[in-house]
Image (cartoon, rainbow, N blue to C red):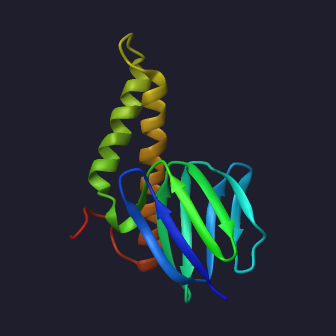
Amino acid sequence: MPLSVHIVTAEREVFTEDGIDEVIVPGIEGEMTVLPEHAPLLTMIKPGVMRIVKSGEEIDMAITGGFIEVRQDRVTILADAAERAEEIDTVRAEEARRQAERALEEREADVDLAAAAAMLQRSLMRLKAVERRRRRSGTRPGPPGV
């Protein structure tokens, strides 16, 4: 029996689909794969790239952390933030990466270093999701809809 996967954030439902073969998430103790008939589970997810496999096709998502619950072939992910790779604006993500790196390098008194480090981590994760999708499809990254 395939998995039913639901990914939600405080702002929106990011992904809801049945017939999923596997979900690969960045768990707090390493990458974790959830397959049909997985044992019940509730654990934290760390920021990274999540992959969803259905009929041999992979969907890449950038996720900034949250929780995953697995119960009776139903996977529920409550994410701080999550985006499909095709939704990510590469130009904006690259600019966010540069801004965060500048803030960390300059270490000005009014710069929140923890916020700059988090922005850097999120932009790198988003760019990694786009790069994985680009390598698999053979397309160049760009803004959504281009």
In this view, which residue lies farthest toward the top?
Answer: 109
- Image spot of residue 140 (x, y percent): 33, 69
Q: Quadrant of residue 85?
A: bottom left
Q: In this orientation, which residue lies closer to the viewer: 5 or 130?
A: 5
Q: Residue furthest front?
A: 72
Q: Is residue 35 left or right of residue 100?
A: right
Q: Give the image location of residue 79, x and y in percent.
A: 50, 53
The image shows residue 78 at horizontal and vertical percentages of 53, 55
Where residue 31 sits: x, y (%)? 69, 59
- Whether residue 14 sits left or right of residue 51 in the image: it is left
Image height check: is 118 above or below 89? above
User: Which sits in the foreground, 7 or 116?
Assistant: 7
Q: Is residue 101 above or below residue 78?
A: above
Q: Residue at x 42, y 37 (%)?
A: 119
| Quadrant occupied by the N terminus | bottom right
Count the marks: how many?
Answer: 0
Image point 72% across, 54% down: which residue? 30
Where the C terminus falls, by quadrant? bottom left
Q: Residue at x 69, y 48 (%)?
A: 28
Q: Quadrant of residue 71?
A: bottom right
- For the residue pair 26 and 123, the one nearer the viewer reads as 26
Residue located at (55% from left, 89% from top): 55
Task: Work out which residue is located at the far right of the displayed protein and give it.
Answer: 39
